[in-house]
Image (cartoon, rainbow, N blue to C red):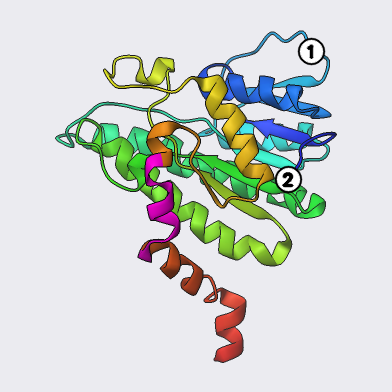
Amino acid sequence: MNIENKTVLITGANRGIGKALVQEALRRGARRVYAASRSALEVSDKRVMPLTLDVTNAKQIQRAVENVESLDLLINNAGVFLPDDLSSRAALDENLAVNLFGTQAVSQAFLPLLARSQGAMVNVLSIAALASVPFSPAYSISKAAAFSLTQSLRALWAARGVKVHAVLAGPVDTDMSRSLELPKASPESVAQNIFEGLQNGEEEIFPDPTSQSVAEGWRKGVAKALERQFAAFTPENTAKVA
């Protein structure tokens, strides 16, 4: 997808990767960018339309849908990262509420608009979806679940002409990961590479040096091969076989 003259909605647009994605979309000539966040945003570019959107709030999701006339690209970027040790369910519940159920709710709500435009959806995930990180297992579990959701929607929505992409990012220099003593990519470079991967039609986008080190292994691995095989087992196809 080339987003020039396209309409884009980005959740979690107030900081970090989300803010960088808004700027990169404008740089690439997007016609309209809906910048969604839990708190109101101040914007100067007339192409940007702020939306108040907590992805865990069903009423706010519905209100956002009502305020978006058309949509070519949905980027589910809103997320939380909470260090934990799985000794309490609270951290797991909070990570799942935003990273999995919030993503699912927003995706489903905007599907009709995406189907109408034959558009695309991008879910910003993490390489922690492929292998758990021990300092935040609840986050890893939620991202792994969101990755499975992404693969499922990719297969289910193909018949409606909607393409579904996953961003499997490594450490990025944002407020969310500020406390981690790891080499980090800049949000701006990650945003650029997300749009490059989208334009190149990559189902899984690895937007930084850390994630790119595992990209080839993923694309040629058994898990990706199984996904392609299982994609044939959609409800429509299994009903035909039965």
Q: How far apart in space, not on screen, are marks 1 and 2 (Cα)?
A: 23 Å
Q: Which quadrant: the N terminus? A: top right
Q: Is residue 153 left or right of residue 47?
A: left
Q: Residue at x 56, y 73 (%)?
A: 234
Q: Say if 158 sits above or below 86 in the image.
A: below
Q: Position of residue 194 (x, y in %)?
A: 58, 36
Q: How many numbered marks are there? A: 2
In depth, the one of 120 and 242 nearer the eye is 120
Farthest left residue?
Answer: 87
Q: Position of residue 177 (x, y in %)?
A: 36, 20
Residue at the disc numbered 2: 1
Q: Residue at x 79, y 29 (%)?
A: 30
Q: Residue at x 46, y 43 (%)?
A: 101
Residue at the disc numbered 1: 45
Q: Is residue 218 magenta?
A: yes
User: Identity of the amino acid at label 1?
Assistant: Asp
Q: Position of residue 182 (x, y in %)?
A: 29, 22
Secondary structure at badge 2 equals loop
Q: Say if 75 sits above or below 231 in the image.
A: above
Q: Which residues are magenta?
A: 213-222
Q: Is residue 216 magenta?
A: yes
Q: Is residue 116 left or right of residue 149?
A: right
Question: Is residue 126 something one can see in this rendering?
Answer: no
Q: Residues within 10 Å of mark 1 (few under 14, many from 20)?
A: few
